Image (tube, rainbow, N blue to C red):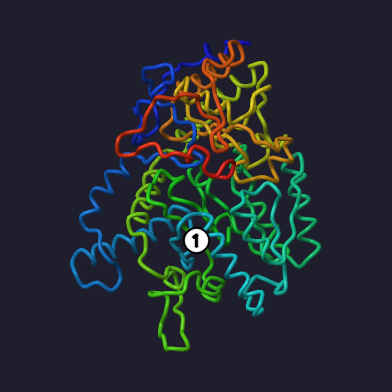
Amino acid sequence: MSSAILEKAPVAAEPLLPVVGSELAAPLIHGGHVRYANLDYAASAPAVEDVAAHLSEVLPYYASVHRGAGFASQVSTSVYENARHIVAGFVGARADDTVIFTRNTTDSLNLLAGCVQSLLAGNGFTEGVSNAHGEVLYLDIEHHANLLPWQGLPHRSVVAGQSLASTLSRVETQLRAGNVVLLAVTGASNVTGEVLPVAELAALAHQYGARIVVDAAQLAPHRRIDMARDGIDFLAFSGHKLYAPFGSGVLVGRPDWLDAGTPHLAGGGAVKDVRLESVRWTEGPARHEAGSPNVLGAATLARAAQVLAGLDADEWHAHEQQLRSHLVAGLSETDGVTVHHLFSDADTYPNAGSIGVVNFSVEGYDAGLVAAYLSAEHGVGVRDGKFCAHPLLRRLGLPSGSLRASFGVGSRLEDADRLIAGIRTLLADGLGWDYVVDAGRWVPANDSRSYPAWAPNTPGTAGAAPCTTD
């Protein structure tokens, strides 16, 4: 196994932005502590320090919104509604696009699916859509959030090709066959990090009388998005992947479908008038935001958007590409490690490339065991499993799962080096501790380490929701 990659680049490159928890000490199974190397950004990214500071500013004013006359309520309402304008600017939305705050990307896409279902039932499609009785078209590489909501509607799936060029050709073939009302695609694969040319896909959808929705959960934290320029009709992403806590998501898109669709939740705030046996629903964002909204989630998401918008794009992408190239090279030069990808032309196709997500497997080792080993013996956090993309993992020949390292603005080259070194130590020397399966997950046997006092170990949680989270 070559160690040349570890010698080619500096191993202490500074993070692009400071993030909360960057110096977190992780306990090792053999004793002692080491700085936690967080390579699990694609699941939930740490909060940027500026976002955490903004939360402290907003929190004293936290109150009800929209109908409160008190000072704190007025401030909270201003913060909440201004967050819509910030998010709209961040993604290059059109002037009349609606910005709806949701729980996460999954919630956003389910909301849109409900609107499409309503419109299909009532044939209520409008401008730019000629297939009023149509189907939803999606790729087989999608995260479950952009696959399962469409299975309850008339739908078709496209098996992606070995290249982006062949994949677009297959998409066009299905669009040309007619009857597609919506094309649902990911902006960047949550499994491999490869970016899809969404502007080209949007142009194809519009050419054949359909609209497009982009799952930008992975794209938004890594790339500039311009909905108006690229022709994106609907866009969904999550705050918790955008360096903002509190579980807020966003759906941004054309108001005609959103105003015509059945409200996502039936409740207070979404109505114009209610009688005992009837209701008149309102339009605009409130139509789908019944109940007390997640004010702090919207506020932190908006501040994260401002912080990312303020980055120099070239510096941002260079930081990420340095990390990705370093990690891919180090893993690829390690005998027994396979780095997985989808498209042969991902790095050469226009407006494509890859974000800070690397998928790999280690010969002879279960992915979950490797992840447990890296955490316990090296203080490195990675993801293992099927990444809520079961059809894609089966297609890659990985039905039992693989490993994923992901990073972002708070990452360092040292994090990648520690992962590479840990894998090489495993392949050279084997496991340094005994591991057992507990509730479906690999864990160190006889683990005496403990969580902080305010977060006690709870029996049976080690394997909660195996192979499904992301």
Q: Is residue 1 above or below residue 151?
A: above
**Residue 446: x and y, percent?**
46, 24
The residue at 56%/17% (across/down) is 431
Q: Is residue 104 above or below residue 264?
A: above
The residue singled out by tag 1 in the image is: 252
Front residue of this view, candidates 164 and 139: 139
Q: Residue furthest left?
A: 71
Sort mark 1 into few (<14), some (14-19) or many (20+) by Cα contacts within 10 Å. many
Q: Which image quarter holds the N terminus? A: top right
The residue at 48%/37% (across/down) is 41
Q: Which image quarter holds the C terminus? A: top right
Q: Is residue 449 above or below residue 212?
A: above
State how many labels appear: 1
Q: Is residue 219 left or right of residue 410?
A: right
**Residue 423: x and y, percent?**
57, 19
Front residue of this view, candidates 366 and 442: 442
The residue at 64%/24% (across/down) is 365
**Residue 384: x and y, percent?**
57, 34
Q: Is residue 168 above or below residue 97?
A: above
Q: Amino acid at mark 1?
A: Val
Front residue of this view, candidates 122 and 440: 440
**Residue 272: x and y, percent?**
41, 82
> Which corner quadrant of the image does residue 23 belong to?
top left
Front residue of this view, candidates 92 and 178: 178
Q: Is residue 141 left or right of residue 371?
A: right
Q: Secondary structure at mark 1?
A: strand
> Which corner quadrant of the image does residue 46 belong to?
top left
The residue at 27%/62% (across/down) is 76
